[in-house]
Image (tube, rainbow, N blue to C red):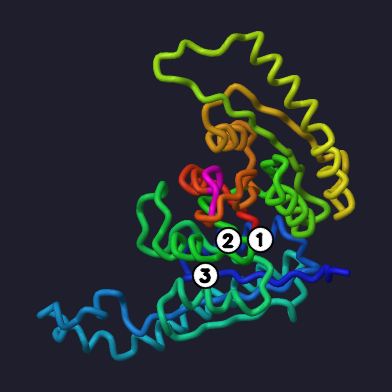
């Protein structure tokens, strides 16, 4: 029988976005059964100093760097102590929160990936870190972790996502079934409502004036009929995991050109802060480690927490 205990690796850098990861996790995860490792990879010096041989002015600034390591470590540990207090106040047993500050070995993203291989159930990172200005873009660390974290689920936290509502993208793939099961096991039993959404895409040809309304209704009805047993099974999975049945609803969206855009718009209009999706959909194309819907959602979901489940 699978253990209820979950181990979460939370990559933090002391930024405002890192704090939002902690706040989000403290509201949405089943904290009583979760162990959290706050993980920080510390550079020996700011990025510009890695190329000091190319910068003739660096020697004039070396004096300012003598105590940089100690100051940087003190600041991140201060941040982590505050993060631990927040998590404990939210319900995580104090012994279940660990702090891990390590010197950079191969690179921040690679070091996070290396740590993630030690029995973790989820990796959580911010969409952007210190110094990132453009909210629409993934930071370099988040991008690398996303691409290479193919063995465990990853959560990308953007902006200040609400923890009150969860959207789970559902189809008839194994990835979708795993996403539903994983969401049920990770969520707190008391807080969020869950909306399971299936999207029927209808490609539009250039210059096409739109599909016949009757055809759309027919497709909608057919999709709802086909998805009913899928939704029923997924609902049972969530209830068995402890999700309140009264907080679960299902929806079929049809007649759209993009599944990802429809999912994102549904989340936006419903003020849903968490989107859960399988890493790959029905096609399961082996050449690509992530499907089109998940890939597009990473580009669109700048103000949500996006769970990508293997």
* SS for dot 1: helix
For mark 1, does the 10 Å Cα neighbourhood hold few (<14), some (14 to 19), or many (20 or more) residues?
many
In the rendered structure, the answer to whether residue 18 lies left or right of residue 284 reads left
Residue 12 shows which numbered tag? 3
Place of residue 292 in the rendered image (x, y in percent of width and height, measured from the top left): 52, 44
Place of residue 24 in the rendered image (x, y in percent of width and height, measured from the top left): 63, 57
Towards the viewer: 200 or 128? 200
Place of residue 13 in the rendered image (x, y in percent of width and height, measured from the top left): 47, 71
* SS for dot 2: helix
**Residues drawn in magenta:** 290-294
- The residue to which callout 2 is attached is 21
On the image, which quarter does residue 202 sit in? top right
Cα separation between marks 3 and 2: 8 Å
Residue 25 shows which numbered tag? 1
Relative to residue 310, is residue 217 depicted above or below?
Answer: above
Q: Are marks 3 and 2 in contact (CB under 8 Å)?
A: yes
- Counting residues from the start of the chain, the first of labels 3 and 2 encountered is 3
* SS for dot 3: loop
Relative to residue 275, is residue 263 depicted above or below?
Answer: above
- Counting residues from the start of the chain, the first of labels 3 and 1 encountered is 3
């Amino acid at each position: 029988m699978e253990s209820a205990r979950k181990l979460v690796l939370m990559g933090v850098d002391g930024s405002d976005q890192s704090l939002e990861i902690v706040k989000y996790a403290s509201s949405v995860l089943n904290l009583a059964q979760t162990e959290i490792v706050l993980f920080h990879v510390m550079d020996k010096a700011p990025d510009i100093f890695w190329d000091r041989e190319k910068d003739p002015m660096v020697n004039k600034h070396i004096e300012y760097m003598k105590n940089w390591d100690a100051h940087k470590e003190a600041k991140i540990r201060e941040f982590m102590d505050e993060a631990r207090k927040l998590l404990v106040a939210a319900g995580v047993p104090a012994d279940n929160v660990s702090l891990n500050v390590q010197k950079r070995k191969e690179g921040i993203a690679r070091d996070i990936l290396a740590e993630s291989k030690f029995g973790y159930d989820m990796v959580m990172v911010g969409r952007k870190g210190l110094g990132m200005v453009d909210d629409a873009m993934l930071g370099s660390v988040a991008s690398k972790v996303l691409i290479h974290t193919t063995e465990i689920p990853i959560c990308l936290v953007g902006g200040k996502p609400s923890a009150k509502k969860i959207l789970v993208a559902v189809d008839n793939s194994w990835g979708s079934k795993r996403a539903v099961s994983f969401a049920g096991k990770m969520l707190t039993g008391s807080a969020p409502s869950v909306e399971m959404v299936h999207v029927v895409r209808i490609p539009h040809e250039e210059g096409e004036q739109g599909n016949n309304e009757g055809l759309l209704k027919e497709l909608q009805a057919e999709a709802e009929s086909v998805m009913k047993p899928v939704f029923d099974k997924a609902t049972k999975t969530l209830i068995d995991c402890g999700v309140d049945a009264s907080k679960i609803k299902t929806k079929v969206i049809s007649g759209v050109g993009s599944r990802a855009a429809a999912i994102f718009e549904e989340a936006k209009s419903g003020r849903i802060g968490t989107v859960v999706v399988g890493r790959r959909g029905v096609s399961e194309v082996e050449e690509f480690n992530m499907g089109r819907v998940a890939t597009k959602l990473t580009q669109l979901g700048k103000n949500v927490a996006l769970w990508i489940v293997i």
